Image (cartoon, rainbow, N blue to C red):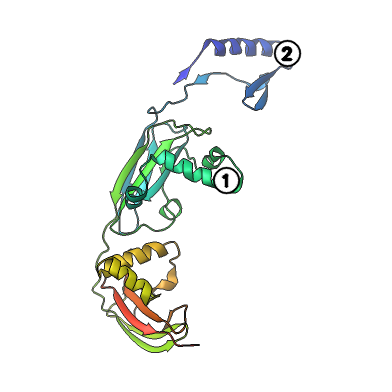
Amino acid sequence: MKRLLSLSALLLIFVMGAIAQESHNYIMKIQKKDTLLSIPVTMIDSIYFVDNPSAGDLTFDIDVSNITAGDANIVITPSDDLTPYYYSITDSIGRDNNYNGSWYELEVGWWSYLAGVYGMTWQEVAKQFLVTGEHTANIEEDYGGRLMWDTPYIVYCFGMDNDGNLTSDIAEEEFRTAKPIPSDNKITVTIKEEQSDGALIDVATTNNDTYFIDCQKTSYVDYYLEKYNGSKEQMFYNFFSSLRTQVNDQYFHNGNQTDLKAKALTPDADYYIIICGFSDGPTTDIQLIPFHTAAQ
């Protein structure tokens, strides 16, 4: 809400009087911390003061819709279109397991780290991430990759000025991604040749649904199978979550494949081919097919 103060009234009188005296070219000097601003009086139409929102004045409406196994539509609408704010998306598993402070404190810690790297203050870093007005989240950019299936997430936001001060309470909204829709695709793998850098395989399918394929060392897979009491689903979830920012089209295929290369890094080593139907998550049984890379 705009509030005219006695000081503003004095300034307005000064401005009007200065403009009336055409023989003078007055300059208004405004000291802002270490910066001195100079503004020709003839360029000033009016002067007024606006209350700086205190914590709690700025509120947010966080709308989460169209939730799938790997995506969601997130729209954040602040009560004031002009006040800067920050928002982020995180999985609540990471929050619950690793952090007990406020989201603001968490972000200040991250900005402080970046400030040390780039030789800036954390406030200068934070300013780069502030937005205004209604904002639609881009999952790939704002979260850093696709969402994981059947996972709880939190969207949080808070108002903040350029000096790093909170201008609102911290708002958050929780949601959970869906489970992948099962596929009736039957996938059969035939190993044709074990090579030093992987295996040459044929893949037969019963429909054209997308499937995922990769190779991982037996020791890696077995470690997580043991950790999760033999659950291939939990093993694959852990594996894919560590891979999700690097996943590209080379991991996915459709239909029958002949002489497909399942790539491995280490010769003369035990590996699994990991293969399953995939649409924002596993849609068929997760198959673990063992092979041994050839020696060089």
Task: Using the image, determine if residue 21 lies above or below residue 33.
Answer: above
The quarter of the picture where residue 29 lies is top right
The percent coordinates of residue 202 (x first, y second) are 36, 85
Residue extending farthest right: 23
Instruction: Residue 121: name its quadrant.
Output: top right
Per the image, the residue denoted by label 2 is 22
Q: Is residue 99 above or below residue 18?
A: below
What residue appears at the point 55 percent right and 42 percent down from the top-left corner? 125
Observer-nearest residue: 131 or 40? Answer: 131
- Specify whether 145 is left or right of 236: right
Most extreme residue toward the bottom is: 192
**Which label's residue is closer to the chain start, 2 or 1?**
2
Classify mark 2: residues with Cα within 10 Å, few (<14), some (14-19) or many (20+).
few
Question: Is the residue under label 1 in contact with that under label 2 (CB below 8 Å)?
Answer: no
Q: Distance of mark 2 from mark 1, alpha carbons?
A: 52 Å
**Residue 100: x and y, percent?**
35, 43
